[in-house]
Image (tube, rainbow, N blue to C red):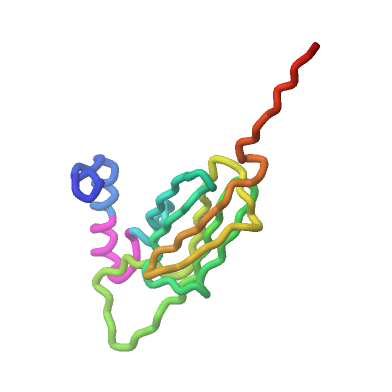
């Protein structure tokens, strides 16, 4: 294990990498790799006493290129990254995404959408999703019958 990631890969991922290599040799400069895969950027999602935290890797993305919303029990992150035109440049490999993508992350419980906050720091988006009042533990009073 290196940094928490397995060094052995499932054969389907090895096949996908080989297809990426072949397609890149036929269509040089196109982002056949990570940018076109549905899984999108790497995400961590965890729960603490107050709610959920989501970290998403978005290198090179600016805050005005993000649209973040909560719909029911789903966090939706939309990104629009314009393609930069550079004269005299030939890409031999281009994996960083350009264009738009949408990532919907299912949430394990209802959150308070009015109190959701997001911060983008050095290419990492951190979203804080407080639990909705209905998802918080509630003490139930026990009554004694006579």
Q: Residue at x 29, y 42 (%)?
A: 12
Tell me residue 94's x, y (percent): 30, 69
Nearer to the camera, 113 or 92: 113
Give the vertical position of 25 relative to 14 (above or below): below
Q: Residue furthest right?
A: 146
- In this rendering, position of residue 52 left or right of residue 5: right
Tell me residue 85's x, y (percent): 39, 83
Nearer to the camera, 82 or 1: 1
Quarter of the figure with the N terminus: top left
Residue 28 included in the magenta stretch of the image: yes
Give the vertical position of 93 relative to 142 (above or below): below
Tell me residue 122's x, y (percent): 37, 70
Q: Residue at x 27, y 63 (%)?
A: 24
Q: Residue furthest top?
A: 146
Q: Residue at x 24, y 64 (%)?
A: 25
Tell me residue 33's x, y (percent): 32, 59
Residue 71 included in the magenta stretch of the image: no
Residue range (magenta): 20-33
Q: Residue at x 27, y 75 (%)?
A: 91
Quarter of the figure with the C terminus: top right
The picture quadrant where one finds residue 40 is bottom left
Nearer to the camera, 36 or 144: 144
- In this rendering, position of residue 70 left or right of residue 38: right
The picture quadrant where one finds residue 21 is bottom left
């Amino acid at each position: 294990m290196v940094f928490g990631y397995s060094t052995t890969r499932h054969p389907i991922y090895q096949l996908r990498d080989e297809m990426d290599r072949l397609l890149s040799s036929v269509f040089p400069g196109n982002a056949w790799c990570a940018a076109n895969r549905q899984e999108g950027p790497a995400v961590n999602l965890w729960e603490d006493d107050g709610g959920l935290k989501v970290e998403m890797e978005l290198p090179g993305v600016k805050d005005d290129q993000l649209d973040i919303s909560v719909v029911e029990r789903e966090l939706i992150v939309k990104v629009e990254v314009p393609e930069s035109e550079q004269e005299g440049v030939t890409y031999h490999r281009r994996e960083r995404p350009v264009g738009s993508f949408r990532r919907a992350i299912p949430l394990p419980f209802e959150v308070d959408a009015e109190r959701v906050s997001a911060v983008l720091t050095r290419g990492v988006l951190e979203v804080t999703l407080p639990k909705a009042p209905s998802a918080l533990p509630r003490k139930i009073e026990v009554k004694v019958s006579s």
